[in-house]
Image (tube, grey):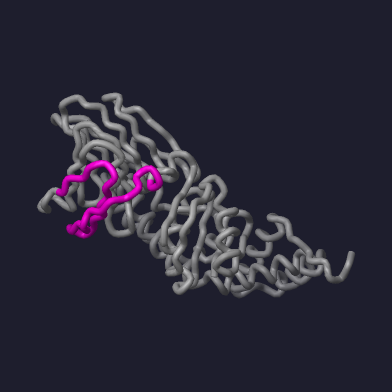
Amino acid sequence: MNNTERVIPTPAQEQAAFAWLSLLHDQPSSGDQATFSHWLQADPAHAEAYAQAQVVWELTETPARTLADEDALALQGYLNAMNRSRRTSVRRWSGALAMAMAACMVLMIGVGAGWQPSRWVDDLGADYVSAPGEIRTVTLADQSQVTLDADSAIAVDFSRGERHVQLRRGAGFFSVTHTGEPFVVDAEKGQARVLGTQFEVRLQPHGAQVTVLSGRVGVTADKHAEQQILIAGQQVAYGEGAAQKLHAVDSEAQLAWRQGWLNYYKATLADVVQDLGRYYPGRIVLLNDELAARRVSGSFPSKDPQAVLSSLQGVLGFEQHKVLGHLIILR
């Protein structure tokens, strides 16, 4: 083999390297150290995999601890929801689970294990769910249709003279059948209320955004807020009890995700990465705050997040590190 040729570890070798890295950070015995030394020398790919694991560990330790804290809270919420009749026993062992999980999350995030309890909490009370990368259309009991963006979830309640849909995660495009009964989409603390129309509701970090394709939609930021009426080609975002000023948008371009396209005009890279994360079967971690604030414009296919990142990398010049095919680190 040419000395300048780079050795490419297999996913199994990368995973073994992370396992060794975790073990060696936890007071290994002399026997463990000897076994590791033998493993390291057995194949040049092992040394390359271990070197990559060390780089990734250093890059992700701080954000991984943050994710560990977030996921620990989500896990506790999931356990409490499943065991409300046994709260005492849940409290006793869910705390231990959260502590144990926080201790090992650096490794779990590093290997892109897909551990995301926040999804479990959303899905527990959901009637319809779409998986990461899946666009799913469902027909409700009143023949209205909901197209779920990737990694989304809704709960449906048609009772008490109103049709209610709760958006629990992601985004949904609603084609509402006129029945005479109000159709209400609850998202965060606000609502979008219609009789018959086509519109999207999309959750955001601190609220939601409503985009109307046809018809009229009344949007309130919370139960005490004044209603804003949106017509076709208009959009409004709300959060924390207050709504922004509604404005005109190209609805077809905004809603092109239904045809497999993500369109952006001067969007932050952080927003683009967040969208791509719904289509990627793992996690994408953006570590550089300055990079996250860079602006992006363009039209990208949602089916291949890795290709989109590679395209953006050529323009913005950031670094990519891919681990085990599940985790992408940008910096």
In-image side of 289 versus 159 (left or right): right
Q: Relative to residue 219, is residue 330 drawn left or right?
A: right
Quarter of the image with the C terminus in it: bottom right
The answer to whether residue 250 shows anywhere in this view is yes
Rendered residue at 41%/62% (across/down): 266
Task: Answer whether residue 258 is magenta in the image.
Answer: no
Per the rendered image, the range of residues in magenta is 228-254
Q: Position of residue 162 (x, y in %)?
A: 16, 32
Indicate the position of residue 22 as horizontal and vertical percent values.
60, 68
- Which of the 4 quarters of the picture holds residue 191? top left
Q: Nearer the viewer, residue 151 or 289?
A: 289
Q: Picture quarter containing residue 51? A: bottom right
Q: Residue at x 18, y 30 (%)?
A: 159
Identify whether 154 is placed above or below 272: above
Q: Is residue 263 left or right of residue 156?
A: right
| Quarter location, residue 97 | bottom left
Q: Is residue 69 above or below residue 184?
A: below
Residue 61 horizontal/vertical position (percent):
52, 71
